[in-house]
Image (cartoon, helix red, strand yellow):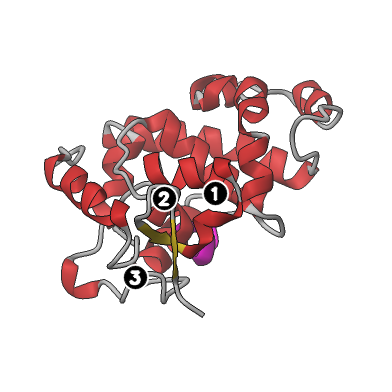
Amino acid sequence: MSTTIVGPDGQFRCRWCGVSPEILAYHDTEWGFPVSDDHRLFEKLSLEGFQSGLSWRTILSKRQNFRAAFHDFDFDRVARFTQSDIDRLLKNEGIVRHRGKIEAVVNNARHAQELAKRDGSLAAYIWRYEPGMRQLAKPQTASTSAESLALSKDLKKQGWKFVGPTTVYAFMQAMGLINDHLEDCVIRTKVEHARERFERPGG
């Protein structure tokens, strides 16, 4: 089976983006483009945790509901959530109602505060784990990497939850720490140009 599909414009794209128009748009405009905004980084780490055992299509369809529920993933606000907030979210039919995952977001928000205070921003910490070109596998052939293993291990050491190496690798793919679009995907070059222009935080 080919690893690419032909998009509506006749150009090749990564096969996984063909499941729905929403996923196609996500692939073309978000996935792999570098991100330095702390709230977006925290959002993606949180949503990757919620995705565990589910599909990204399911999570993406609920993303606006998640954003409303978690104050656009402003971790300073989420860190102040109480047990009553968690109980309220467990009744929110617009999100994934999994106690452990909801509690993990609140827990992780508090640790994100600590990281931002220590390193200046969550982004400055995260982008230290950007792999060099020599460490990169052929696009979409790996589910973990030395960097995702290291980042996962360090986050867990600091008390983060739902941040296993596979989850962290998917986060790194999505947030542009690597360009994992296939070689003949039309978006790969756009992402590469964005990465070339990107100002690494804390650098």
For residue 160, the mark is 1
Residue placed at 34% from the left, 70% from the top? 139
Name the disc covering residue 94, or none: none
Which residue bears the numbered disc 2?
174
* Mark sitting earlier along the chain (3/2): 3
Residue reaching furthest to the bottom: 1
Label 3 sits on residue: 139
The CA span between labels 3 and 1 is 28 Å
> Measured along the vertical axis of the image, is residue 29 above or below residue 130?
above
The boundaries of the magenta stretch are: 163-168
**Mark 3 touching mark 1, by CB under 8 A?**
no
Q: Residue furthest right?
A: 91
User: Element under label 2?
Assistant: helix
Residue depicted at 51% across the width and 55% down the height: 17
The quadrant where residue 33 appears: top left
Residue 196 image offset from top left, x and y in percent: 13, 47
Q: Name the side, left or right, on which 132 lies relative to 75.
A: left
Give the main secondary structure, helix, strand or loop, of the magenta stretch: helix
Q: Position of residue 195 (x, y in %)?
A: 19, 47
Residue 42 in the image: state x and y as whole percent: 47, 37
Q: Is 47 covered by the magenta stretch?
A: no
Query: Which of the two residues, 87 or 3, is positioned nearer the viewer here?
Result: 3
Closer mark to the observer between disc 3 and disc 1: 3
Depth order, front residue of 55/72 = 55
Q: What's under tag 2, amino acid-wise?
A: Ala
